[in-house]
Amino acid sequence: MFRPAAIFIGLRYTRAKRRNHFISFISLMSMFGIALGVLVLITVLSVMNGFDREIKKRVFSLWPPITVSGVSGYISNWHEVQRIIDDNPSVIATAPFVSGQILLTDNGQVQPAMLNGIDPAQEKRLSALAKKVVQGHLTDLVAGGFGIVLGEDLANRLGVMLGDKVTVVTTQMSISPAGAIPRFKRFTVVGIFHAGSGFGFDISLAFIHLADSQILFQMGKSVSGLHANIKNIYAAQKVGDELAETLGPSARISDWTQQFGPFFSAVKLEKTMMFFILMLIVAVAVFNLVCSLVMVVNDKESDIAILRTIGATPRLIVAIFVVQGAIIGVVGTVLGVIGGIALALNVTAIVAWIERVFHVQFLSSSVYYVNYLPSELLFSDVIQISAVALLLSLLATLYPAWRASRTEPVEALRYE
């Protein structure tokens, strides 16, 4: 079967037994170095993707991407506003809310919290709060029942359980013969939710029924605003601008980027920097590839000279050594991709097995938001890493190949 001379000779140089075994060893180490760098890059970026996914899952399970409120602090015609928001094609679900800062007291314990009045039926379509309730049910919040759902840490701080009573003290004042006193109301604990540590939801949030919150905060039929969930959370600013244009100047639009944007930007920057730092492993392997090809050129000077005397052009000589270096780069990259994908898909189970066998815990949810090592393999990362590794490998062949093409046949064969 016909094959171009450059590919035929380049493959032969790769397979042939060299007189200098040290050169073979350096070439092999270059190949495994590229494979190791690609493997580590794919695995580390997959783990960082897993952390990013878990953090987003915890944040957006309770925190809405977009919040619409009134410039006056309340929305009276919220049914009409909700209809306008729902008409936006990017919006998945909406739900009204009433919120305010409160103090919770019981058994001599006092804890500050953000109290949110919600409609449980509509909230189920908007967030994962119902799935986060570990004791009781979100549907136990009924209008007029004055029930409350507390975060797990908040309930522990207060020392309350299901069925216990807590006192809610608002910042609003009631006028009495004794003067202005804070308004307060007794609520029954009907549910406890657990959202996970890291963002303080369990210690800072409490939920009651929308109708009860309107009575507590003297809102009448008005609400503080509406929460909206959208198809693509990264389009929150664009959707917010569209809603602001539709609703006019009476509406105030805020999105998740104003609250958590800097945090997720830092995570994205950390992933980018990790990519460049770990790419140095591939760069070291590529440097070894340059060295091994230079030594091959020196070792094959007489062969190159003979090829030149029988008519091989400098371009052919360049192509021969580019093929040889490319083979090392391609094989190393393929091995790294296979190993990286296998490790990224199983790293969670592997770390869990190590923790179980050696009775250690590498991750604590109080520090890393999760108590296990998450991983999410993105093939866009695999393609990007593979492309960079192959490009560096090809660039590494240029200088040795150019040097080989400059070999003078007379000088190389003088002492043969």
Image (cartoon, helix red, strand yellow):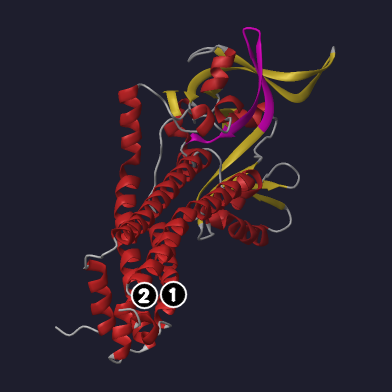
Residue 378 locus on image (x, y percent): 39, 54
Image side of residue 80 versus residue 219, left or right:
left
Q: Amino acid at mark 1?
A: Leu
Q: Tell me the amino acid under the disc marked 2.
A: Val
Foreground of the two, 409 or 234:
409
Which residue is nearer to you in this view: 65 or 27?
27
Q: Position of residue 135 (x, y in %)?
A: 43, 21
First-in-chain label (1 vs 2): 2
Q: Residue at x 37, y 72 (%)?
A: 297
Assess whether residue 152 is covered by the magenta stretch. Answer: no
Is 113 a magenta residue?
A: yes
Vertical order, 353 against 71 (above or below): above
Residue 47 visible in this rendered orientation of the protein: yes
Depth check: give the residue in front, 147 or 291: 291
Q: Could you tell me which quadrant the N terminus lies in?
A: bottom left
Give the magenta part as a residue range. 100-120
Mark 2 Cα-neighbour bin, 10 Å: few <14, some 14–19, many ≥20: many
Mark linked to residue 105: none
Q: Quickly name the residue at label 1.
A: 398
Label 1 with label 2: CB-CB less than 8 Å: yes
Label 1, secondary structure: give it. helix
Query: How far apart, in angstroms, are the residues tagged by discs 1 and 2?
Result: 7 Å
Q: Which residue has dot 2 on it?
A: 322
Give me the residue at 22% from left, 65% from top. Answer: 17
Residue 404 image position (x, y, % from top left): 39, 78
SS under mark 2: helix
